[in-house]
């Protein structure tokens, strides 16, 4: 009896810890959503929201939700343009990375050659490079070459993020293909390009879709490169939300309600896409590390 009581107590403590961790992670998101509906939580968060008037608790903030911020976000010309810019840049970068990274991943999964381990290490190293270490050189180069505030310039800079992801995830999916299929295709005299195009790629279509969406979300959410290397023509959602949205492409003084509303709108598609492909993400990363 005492043993069961101790086990239940340990479980309760564990669940309480889990709940506290989840609340710690989710409370900024919850506040962002509430503030986007113009629910004024600032007095409560400042520690002076609850006052007693005649021994009756009174909250000086406001729990009167409104969708006016969302209406303004969709009717202003600036926000749709920000979404368009982010979509163009992310798609261009991801698609070009697929053409470069997919054959590379196929070669790493298919063949054993000298220097393979070094190449794989270099691919992982690219993913670990801090953006702060390369942003100043890129800014200078872009200023000298005219790539600043251009779609091609942003497409190239996001190769730093997307190419290692594409190579490593696709390598994992290609490595999961049974060796018998490779051997049978080789015995029938198929070339490597034919094997890649007609056999390997159709077998890893779910993984390919997961890789595309994951790389797209990473590009969509990126802030540092976008804040430094974009201007009025290519400003992305992340930069536009932070600096404030205005009507007809202009800008106004930053308001927290606007930032929270734009953050929620930008947050929804990223979370939705990740939830759709979550099992393929786990599979891709575990396979990539297992082979």
Image (cartoon, rainbow, N blue to C red):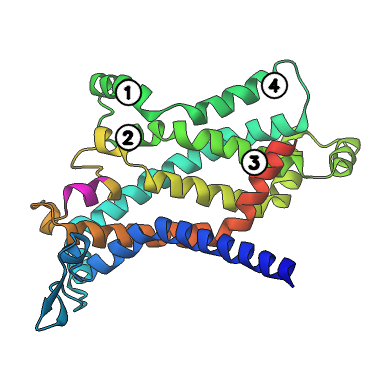
Q: Are marks 3 and 2 in contact (CB under 8 Å)?
A: no
Q: What residue would you read off at disc 2?
A: 225
Say which label, 1 or 2, has the lower sequence index: 1
Residue 73 placed where, x, y %? 21, 64
Q: Considering the numbered disc 2 on the image, is that residue within a helix, a strand or a loop? A: helix
Residue 189: quadrant of the picture: top right
Q: Which mark is residue 117?
A: 4
Which contiguous range is marked in magenta?
Answer: 239-244
**Whole-Å distance between the Cαs marked 1 and 2?**
9 Å
Q: Residue at x 67, y 65 (%)?
A: 6
Residue 263: quadrant of the picture: bottom left
Residue 55 placed where, x, y %? 14, 82
Residue 143 placed where, x, y %? 23, 23
Q: Which mark is residue 170?
A: 3
Q: What residue would you read off at disc 1?
A: 138
Left or right of residue 176: residue 270: left
Q: Nearer the viewer, mark 3 or mark 4?
A: 4
Residue 135: quadrant of the picture: top left
Q: Quadrant of the N terminus?
A: bottom right
Q: Residues within 10 Å of mark 2 (few under 14, many from 20)?
A: some
């Amino acid at each position: 009896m005492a043993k069961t009581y101790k086990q239940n107590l340990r479980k309760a403590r564990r669940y309480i810890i889990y709940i506290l961790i989840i609340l710690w992670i989710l409370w900024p998101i919850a506040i962002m959503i509430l503030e986007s509906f113009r629910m004024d939580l600032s007095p409560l968060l400042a520690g002076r929201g609850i006052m007693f008037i005649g021994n009756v608790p009174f909250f000086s903030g406001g729990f009167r939700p409104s969708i006016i911020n969302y209406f303004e976000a969709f009717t202003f010309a600036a926000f749709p343009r920000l979404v368009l810019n982010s979509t163009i840049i992310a798609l261009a970068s991801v698609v070009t990375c697929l053409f470069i990274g997919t054959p590379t991943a196929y070669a790493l999964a298919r063949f054993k050659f000298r220097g393979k381990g070094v190449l794989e290490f270099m691919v992982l190293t690219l993913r670990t490079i801090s953006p702060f270490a390369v942003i100043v050189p890129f800014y200078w180069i872009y200023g000298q070459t005219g790539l600043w505030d251009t779609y091609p310039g942003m497409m190239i800079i996001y190769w730093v993020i997307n190419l290692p992801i594409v190579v490593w995830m696709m390598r994992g999916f290609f490595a999961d293909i049974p060796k018998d299929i490779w051997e049978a295709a080789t015995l029938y005299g198929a070339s490597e390009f034919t094997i890649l195009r007609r056999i390997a790629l159709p077998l890893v279509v779910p993984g390919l879709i997961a890789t595309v969406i994951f790389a797209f979300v990473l590009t969509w959410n990126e802030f540092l490169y976008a804040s430094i290397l974009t201007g009025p023509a290519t400003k992305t959602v992340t930069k536009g939300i932070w600096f404030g949205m205005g009507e007809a492409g202009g800008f106004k003084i930053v308001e927290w309600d606007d930032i929270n509303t734009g953050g929620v709108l930008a947050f929804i598609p990223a979370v939705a896409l990740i939830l759709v492909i979550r099992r393929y993400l786990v599979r891709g990363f575990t396979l990539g590390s297992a082979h």
